[in-house]
Amino acid sequence: MDMFGKISRALGLAVAVSAACLAARPASYAAAPAGDSHPVLMLTSEGVAAMKDASGTVPRFDAAVDVLLGEAETAVARELCVPVPKDGGGGYTHEMHKQNYYDMYNCGIAWQLTGDERYAAKAKEIMYAYAQMYPTLGYHPLGLSSVPGKIFWQTLNESVWLVHTSVAYDCIYDWLTAKDRKYLEKNLFYPVAEFIMDGTPDNRANNATFNKMHNHGTWAVAGVGMMAMAMGDDDLLDKALYGSDKTGKNGGFIMQLDRLFSPDGYFTEGAYYQRYALWPFVTFAQCIDHYRPELHIFSYRDGIIIKAVETLLQLAYDGEFFRYNDALEKGYDAQELIYAVDIAYNADRSHKDLLSVARDWQDRVLVSDAGYAVAKGIQDGEAEPFVLKSSFFRDGGDGNEGGFAVMRSPRADLNSAVTFKATSHGLSHGHYDKLTFAYYDNGNEIVTDYGAARFVNVEAKHSGHYTAQNKSYAMTTIAHNTLVADERSHFDGKIKVSSKHWPEIYYVDLGEKAVQTVSAVDTAAIPGVRMQRVLSLIDVPFLEYPLIVDLMKADSREAHRYDYPVHYNGHMISLNVPYERALDIMKPLGTANGYNHLWVEAEADGADGTSSYTWMTGDRMYSISTATGPDTEIYLVRTGANDPDFNLRSEPAYIIRENAKTSHLFASCIETHGRYDMQVEQSANLVHSCKGVEVLYSDSSHAVVRYDFINGHSILYAVCLDNPDSGMRHTVSLEDGSSVSWQGPVSVEMK
Amino acid sequence: MDMFGKISRALGLAVAVSAACLAARPASYAAAPAGDSHPVLMLTSEGVAAMKDASGTVPRFDAAVDVLLGEAETAVARELCVPVPKDGGGGYTHEMHKQNYYDMYNCGIAWQLTGDERYAAKAKEIMYAYAQMYPTLGYHPLGLSSVPGKIFWQTLNESVWLVHTSVAYDCIYDWLTAKDRKYLEKNLFYPVAEFIMDGTPDNRANNATFNKMHNHGTWAVAGVGMMAMAMGDDDLLDKALYGSDKTGKNGGFIMQLDRLFSPDGYFTEGAYYQRYALWPFVTFAQCIDHYRPELHIFSYRDGIIIKAVETLLQLAYDGEFFRYNDALEKGYDAQELIYAVDIAYNADRSHKDLLSVARDWQDRVLVSDAGYAVAKGIQDGEAEPFVLKSSFFRDGGDGNEGGFAVMRSPRADLNSAVTFKATSHGLSHGHYDKLTFAYYDNGNEIVTDYGAARFVNVEAKHSGHYTAQNKSYAMTTIAHNTLVADERSHFDGKIKVSSKHWPEIYYVDLGEKAVQTVSAVDTAAIPGVRMQRVLSLIDVPFLEYPLIVDLMKADSREAHRYDYPVHYNGHMISLNVPYERALDIMKPLGTANGYNHLWVEAEADGADGTSSYTWMTGDRMYSISTATGPDTEIYLVRTGANDPDFNLRSEPAYIIRENAKTSHLFASCIETHGRYDMQVEQSANLVHSCKGVEVLYSDSSHAVVRYDFINGHSILYAVCLDNPDSGMRHTVSLEDGSSVSWQGPVSVEMK
């Protein structure tokens, strides 16, 4: 540990910084001074002076300060408690250590703003208690993590502890005596930083994580790097920036910026973890920008950090992030987003739409230079509308590993979104569901993604960790709205295989237009099967709401059982074929791969023609109509079977099954219709309009489907599946001798 | 039909009006003139003049006018469509005829406000179309109602049609020629009124309904009475007021005011139908007050109409009415409440708390004299806070048929309510659940009442009517949070028997105090069993939130199987005894009386001591702890079995069962605890504090229960069950030789 204590402070040289990183910073940004002075992480001395000057004149910021001072006051009053580590997430010692880092953080900032020594003294008191205990600690006794911490059961939490503690230390640095600083750095800050960076001689797992291209690695470098800046240790900072070997080739924050986001600012694990991952990114970047402004960190890689914030904000519906992969309910009001939005705006004040997000969706701002800038910007009327757009985000560091699409109707009166997941696996939080779609409308999840099977912090639910059902159900393919063959998950649920493949994006046509389409092909997820989905969102003149048209095509030489599940939120209203309801006995749909978790509530034979299913969510109806045959099977299922600990939520799904098919085209449309006004008890349009779905033509390269509606309306939907050239003309001959011609990969003819 | 056309207009004499009815009207009310002039129903000519004068100065009223004019404009543009009646609720002709009465109503008022003849002409056009069709109609072809209408499948809707049409007619009365009026009255208005009042020679069901003490009767008299006033037919009005025989002894509005509300303004069917019933009451009363102000209708029976409005507003949580008996989701924003609140305020402007309800919960006001008064009152800053209080409402016309209690904590930081139902049956919409309790907290239903099994207006769900499961499940006792013996419903589900009995209210002690209690006894619901519930809401100094203490006592000479169900909303978190989960096969709990609709998800043996069950709703935990023994059985169930048409919602319950017991005391407490903050991922107090519930003493007259909590705290809860005298002292000797003494029916000792 002494190694660090003795390292003299060197000049901070940006040895491995790329050209992009040195690009000019935005003109609107007033450069902050690099610092020998404190504070220099989340706050600057200039910023603090400005905040003090403005006290009482920016209500949104005043409110944030009031909350922080209230928390700091509570912290001052709280009896010191730094318990010997024992519990996991949600348990007493875990939550107490979290409380302590929030207390130090709040007290540090409160001291800066008020000059009231009680705050500084409280932060110091807590730091000293840790400094006394920390050297006595071995690994956390819980033994549940492969990367165990000392204060917490996993190093991840320890990194978060260090991030907060470094801000606190930065704030009270000048108030502490040199002796205090020496004692704390030697007994606590260097040991924690060294442990997070290198681990112990017995267990180098931490070192691997520190240098890993993973959000846990980002927390690690942020913690270590921020404490390095607080202590003024530029060599240690370089290790955080360029990896523990300082080469910039084997790890570090800069490499994470290169690798962990796609060129479109998409984080491979999905929106839920992009939120979490962004926190250390923006926080560390904010501090770097204060401490080493010459790095122009916010301009690095074409402004990737701010792009990642804007992309995450687009990956949301009604302020809540799209639920896919491992995901729980989180949205714009999550703590991380306060950091992300405030810091991104502070870094580039041309992004005035961020002010709208802060104003409309977030109840607070940071008490920091960034938070003050946002509060002031809103106050000064600088906010511009935040516009949700149809978007396609490429996945992969180079942007060539599939992607994620969002379709939104251009109609201003609508609040809806269709998502399409054709990304790479998404590291350890990815699910096995290539080509999944989901639908959000009218403030509700409509066609749903289960997300994660987890109850964060709830001790009674597997200590708050991911439950066993996350793997046995939530990650399986049948838990998603995509194609399943032979009751087996994509890649048979093997992450090593799945991580090597991603769909080929076939066609993307989004924008403010009546027909938007996205299509992708996957040939690896199901051995021997080529599957392609073509998904359109169409503003149809003769329908109340936009129509979703969905073609899911499977091509294979061998016969398979194909399942096409639609998970939904709402209450079953009707199915247009007779069904057999499970009345006094209920059994699971299958025995493995997630099928074992689905109770069969009802089963039916498909219509010889079109099967239509309607459910109600909120005050609207949703109907899916699908071309089926007499051999088609239909299942209405509900999660909860083989779930000994009640870890699964009880949710319904509608499954269409085709048996012993080599190739098959699932041709469907999903209508949104009707209004069920409980206020005045008036209703309208509660019955779906689609009267028939007929596959007029289907082979491995083309498909033509006619959707018939009431009042003689119809949509002819024709696609070419093997050449997305927009200029190419296609003609197919139908069974009745007629032919259909069109140009380009997708043609939609409405009449 | 000619009988009516020839009746000359007579002076309106209030022959049967009681002394109370003639009481002085509130001083603040400016008397409106009785009317030879039109309009005189919802609007008065003075009111219209005031509204026109104020145009542009009262934004809330302007907005309501804008909406109404928009609707009227749509109506003018709509192609005339008065279809031959065919469909039931939700069907095309049904909804079209509803649309038509709204169109007439909106156009009539729009004509008054604007003088634009297009509106008057449209209302007239629709009226003429009905006048041409109506004489050709027989009974509605659907044949589903025992009180069938002609335009609609049931007369009820026809009465509502007449209420709206009478307002429209009143508005355009002066604009129509005498010839128009004669034609319309002869061919439409009298025939409809006569049909609603008398039925046909073949079927006198309508006459029975017209004179019935029932909300359908109120709609009937309101429709007929309002049209009588529009036409200026005082004799017909007298029939509406005093029954078709005009004696006031066999029916009519005045008798309904005497009978349908308790002295506390409680309507026996419960909050959901009180909302619906109030609509014709307040509407008809408003018109009577304009047309026959000398009746002082709003002062009648000590102001019963306004009292009923205030009582209904108290029967709510978070703006939604308590769900019990036949009930769906309805609240302060329901159309009927706009009428109720506006008209009640207009009638007695000392009720300034009503302005808060209108301002905070309702998005619009009526376009009427009353709506204008409310909008103006809010504008002038007259609104006073609407305060939700702990309340007990007596049931029954004389107030001696049990009652309904609401307990709310005096803590200002809480938003919660405990309800206790000890009412009479509640006519045809009552359920079989004496002594049921429910709990609302944190914006959610926590301990729930299923309410009604119905999908209003959804054709696919039994044409929008109550489904079969309403009787087979929703009405049964096991569907409620009360005591069930031998898997049979109270009164064996026989309404004729149930309607003759109600619980005896034993003790009510509510108010702004730490301990609130309500208790009632029922000896009729379960033959041979005396059941008594003692329910307290206690602000406990050492607990985060108030505690619910619940003693449910059964006394019998014969042995019974007793079930104590707790229906809840949320996700199962933990049970403190091992349980056997239904993994790959699931079966119902029983075969009849609602038990057949419950899937058994898990079963367990009770703890030999205290069984504790925790669930999570929103961001809080809820735990029930109950004294149990080794023979106790526990079931976790979910609705949905034996439900062939998916008419039931999928909802969980926790059931404690005692077998072969003569007498038994279910002693429980329900804790609210913890905080699960997803925004910052912090949680606290997720584990319940109650460590033990011990019945120290229990016989037919006394019970003493000790609740033990962490940190050495405890609550000693002692009750006397057979004498509510507050001065009486009680002493019981415990098994260990010690004794407990207390005074009054309930004693709570916390330490």
Image (cartoon, coloured by chain):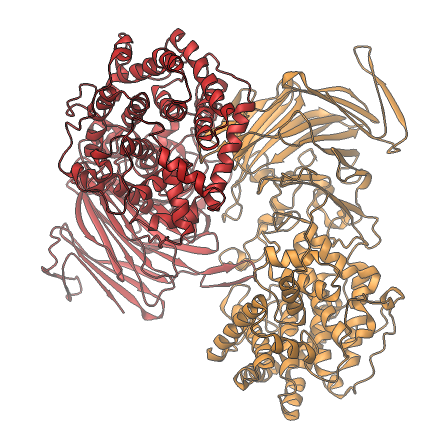
Chain colours: A orange, B red
**Considering only vertical position in the picture, is A136 above or below A222?**
below
**Considering only vertical position in the picture, is B605 above or below B642?**
below
Judging depth in this view, the residue of B637 and A593 nearest the camera is B637
Judging depth in this view, the residue of A547 and B717 nearest the camera is A547
**Considering only vertical position in the picture, is B92 above or below B750?**
above
Judging depth in this view, the residue of A59 and A673 nearest the camera is A59
Left or right: residue B283 versus residue A232 is left
Mark count: 0
Please identify the quarter of the rendering in which residue A151 is found.
bottom right
Relative image position of residue A404 (x, y in whole percent): 74, 45
Relative image position of residue B40 (x, y in whole percent): 33, 30
Please identify the quarter of the rendering in which residue B14 is found.
top left
Q: Is residue B319 visible?
A: no
Please identify the quarter of the rendering in which residue A719 is found.
top right
Left or right: residue A501 versus residue B711 is right
The residue under the point 58% across, 49% down is A453
Q: Is residue A256 visible?
A: yes
Left or right: residue B288 versus residue A436 is left
Q: Quadrant location of the N terminus of chain B?
A: top left
Relative image position of residue B561 (x, y in whole percent): 26, 40
Judging depth in this view, the residue of B400 and A94 nearest the camera is B400
Left or right: residue A505 versus residue B721 is right
Q: Quadrant location of the C terminus of chain B?
A: bottom left
Residue sticking out furthest to the left: B728
Relative image position of residue B513 (x, y in whole percent): 26, 61
